[in-house]
Amino acid sequence: MKTVTVLVLSVLFQTAGNLLVSRGMKQLAATSPWETTPWLSFSLQMAASPSVCLGTLLLITFFILYAALLSWADLSFVLPASSFGYVLNVALAHYLLLEPVSVSRWFGTMLISIGVVLVSMTGTQSGEPVKEETVSQNEVSG
Amino acid sequence: MKTALMITIIVFSTSASDVLIARGARQVKRLSVFKVSEIALIARRILSNGSLLSGVLMAAASFFAFLIVLSWADLSLVLPATSLSYVIATLGSKIILRERINRLRWTGTFLVCAGVALISLP
């Protein structure tokens, strides 16, 4: 139960962080595009943007939660279980940031999520893939 | 084209940072910070570990590239595209670490590639 709660929380933090930095960077680029703005000035504006700072803070929180999660849960469970984050990110980018998301992009995002599940089902260590598979299935059902 | 270049940088720096941090973490070992007296020792080990430091540096580079590409590209394109690092990690473990990759993993890797191809359609 603790694992699922922390997992859901970390995905929510990551999604919120991504949305915020994305919004912040778009706002920044509207006034000073990356190609034409001097490097130092661009960096300073990034550091001064509330959206970028708050988003970065949320992403750091995500990173700490995720690392804590991996200290007790198997990566072969955490990775596939968190792959729904891709779909959540694209969905919220569509509804909150009003990004146009085509049918092929939805379909592609879902393929990636399924692909990540398959990649991580085979385990992250070499050898004994069958054993690792049963472990991750037990964790999912349990 | 510019977006593809930035995504390539993100994907490669993420994969490199994963490998370096994993290698460094195994070298440092015992990261259980329970005693105050041990914190200084562990901190010194972390700071003197080249793999770990360059791994963190690569992670930082990857994050800045992510921020910069988001200043013009859609999050709904960039984020799924960064999953290509799974493909690079699989190829890397096959070629560099000589791990055996089973059929399920190749299928997953292929699905990620197909998905990335689909999201990059206009």
Image (cartoon, rainbow, N blue to C red):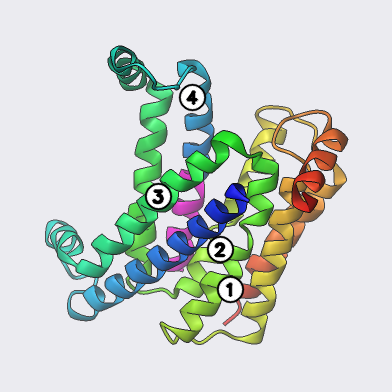
| Magenta region | B1-14
Q: Chain of mark 2?
A: B
Residue designated by label 4:
B25
Give the residue displayed 51% in from the left and 51% down from the top: B11
Q: Which mark is residue B120?
A: 1
Q: Which SS class for mark 2?
A: helix
Q: Report the amino acid beneath label 3.
A: Ser
Q: Is residue A94 left or right of residue A57?
A: right
Residue A72: percent from the left, percent from the top? 59, 35
Q: Nearer the viewer, mark 2 or mark 4?
A: 4
For this orientation, the residue located farthest to the front is A1
Residue ID for mark 2 = B81
Badge 3 marks a residue whose secondary structure is: helix
The quadrant holding residue A82 is bottom right
Marks 2 and 4 sit apart, C-alpha to C-alpha, by: 27 Å
The answer to whether the residue labelled 1 contacts the one labelled 2, judged by CB atoms less than 8 Å apart, is yes
Residue B24, numbered circle: none
Distance between the alpha carbons at the discs numbered 1 and 2? 8 Å
Left or right relative to B88: residue A9: left
Question: Which amino acid is tagged 2?
Answer: Ala
Amino acid on which the number 1 mark rests in the picture = Ser
Where is mark 3, residue-wise? Answer: B62
Which residue is nearer to you in this view: B58 or B48? B48
Q: Decide: marks 3, 1 in contact (CB < 8 A)?
A: no
